[in-house]
């Protein structure tokens, strides 16, 4: 399989069906590959696949419009505006690859036990998607608490930032799905980010499609 040699409609079909997709970042940015799946399809088995086959941080992404409606802000902003000097000092504004972080907070569903198991994390993700797709954002504080074990990331939109967060959310929107998607960085056995070659070999072996970020417009 060649990078970018995939029709976008095939990728969108896979996203709708709940099949994981490999999303390749710009090599001049992070140069990383993430496994991506819509939040509604993130069951315990999918959580295990992400944890074992990808190995990075399992994150839940949505739009900044939604996090704004939930009364949240970017975590870096929260740190910068803190009354505690220690928190202000460690606030990261720009990452090494040139963007401000997209992290907002870390959540658990109130139905969880500890929040870290595959069952619990997948429940948190699916409960969040149900809230978003059901347009019941006013129930956020009733159904979730923080700090939790699922990082919640906000997309600023691909016109402002072209990270995995934005591109994964855009794929879901183009697929006609709710803006709630799970991403996880793929790591190699050498302790570093998995190479594109390794990510493409994984995709081919498992029957997953891979798409380069520049194909998402």
Image (cartoon, rainbow, N blue to C red):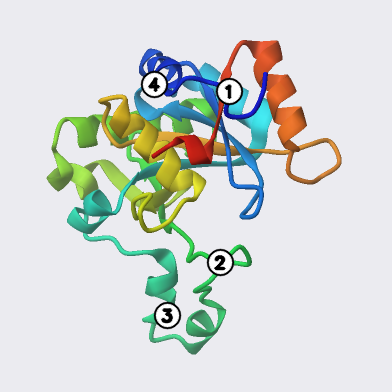
Can residue 124 be seen at all in this image of the molecule? Answer: no
Q: Quadrant of residue 194?
A: top right
Where residue 82 appears, as percent x and y from the top left, is: 39, 81
Of helix, strand and loop, which one carries label 2? loop
Of helix, strand and loop, which one carries label 3? helix
Earlier in the chain: of badge 3 and badge 4, it is 4
Q: Residue furthest right?
A: 190
Which mark lies nearer to you, 1 or 3?
1
Left or right placement of residue 106 versus residue 56 in this view: left
Q: Residues within 10 Å of mark 2 (few under 14, many from 20)?
A: few
Q: Residues within 10 Å of mark 1 (few under 14, many from 20)?
A: few
Q: Nearer the viewer, residue 113 or 106?
A: 106
Estimate the spatial distance between the alpha carbons at disc 4 and disc 1, rounded to whole Å. 14 Å
- Which residue corresponds to mark 4? 12
- Which residue corresponds to mark 3? 80
Of helix, strand and loop, which one carries label 1? loop
Earlier in the chain: of badge 4 and badge 1, it is 1
Q: Quadrant of residue 200?
A: top right
Estimate the spatial distance between the alpha carbons at disc 2 and disc 3, rounded to whole Å. 18 Å
Earlier in the chain: of badge 4 and badge 2, it is 4
Where residue 166 appears, as percent x and y from the top left, is: 41, 46
Q: Are marks 3 and 4 in contact (CB under 8 Å)?
A: no
Of helix, strand and loop, which one carries label 4? helix
Where residue 175 appears, as percent x and y from the top left, is: 31, 24
- Which residue corresponds to mark 2? 98
Q: Nearer the viewer, residue 40 or 22?
A: 22
* Figure quadrant of the N terminus: top right
Which mark lies nearer to you, 1 or 2?
1
- Which residue corresponds to mark 1? 5
Estimate the spatial distance between the alpha carbons at disc 4 and disc 2, rounded to whole Å. 28 Å
Placement of 142 over or under 45, stated as above or below: below
Q: Which residue is located at x 37 percent, y 39 percent?
A: 169
């Amino acid at each position: 399989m060649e990078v970018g040699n995939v029709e976008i409609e095939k990728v969108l079909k896979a996203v709708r069906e709940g099949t994981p997709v490999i999303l390749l970042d710009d090599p001049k940015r992070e140069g990383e590959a993430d496994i991506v799946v819509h939040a509604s399809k993130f069951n315990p088995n999918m959580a295990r696949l992400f944890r074992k086959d990808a190995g990075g941080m399992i994150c839940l992404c949505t739009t900044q419009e939604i996090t704004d409606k939930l009364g949240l802000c970017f975590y870096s902003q929260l740190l910068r505006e803190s009354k505690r000097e220690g928190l202000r000092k460690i606030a990261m504004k720009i990452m090494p690859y040139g963007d401000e972080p997209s992290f907002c907070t870390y959540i658990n569903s109130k139905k969880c036990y500890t929040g870290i198991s595959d069952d619990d994390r997948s429940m948190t993700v699916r409960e969040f998607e149900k809230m978003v797709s059901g347009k019941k954002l006013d129930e956020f504080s009733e159904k979730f608490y923080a700090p939790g074990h699922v990082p919640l990331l906000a997309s600023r939109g691909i016109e402002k930032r072209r990270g995995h967060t934005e591109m994964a959310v855009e794929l879901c929107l183009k697929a006609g799905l709710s803006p709630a998607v799970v991403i996880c960085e793929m790591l190699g056995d050498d302790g570093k980010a998995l190479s594109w070659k390794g990510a493409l070999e994984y995709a081919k072996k498992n029957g997953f499609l891979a798409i380069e970020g520049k194909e998402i417009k």
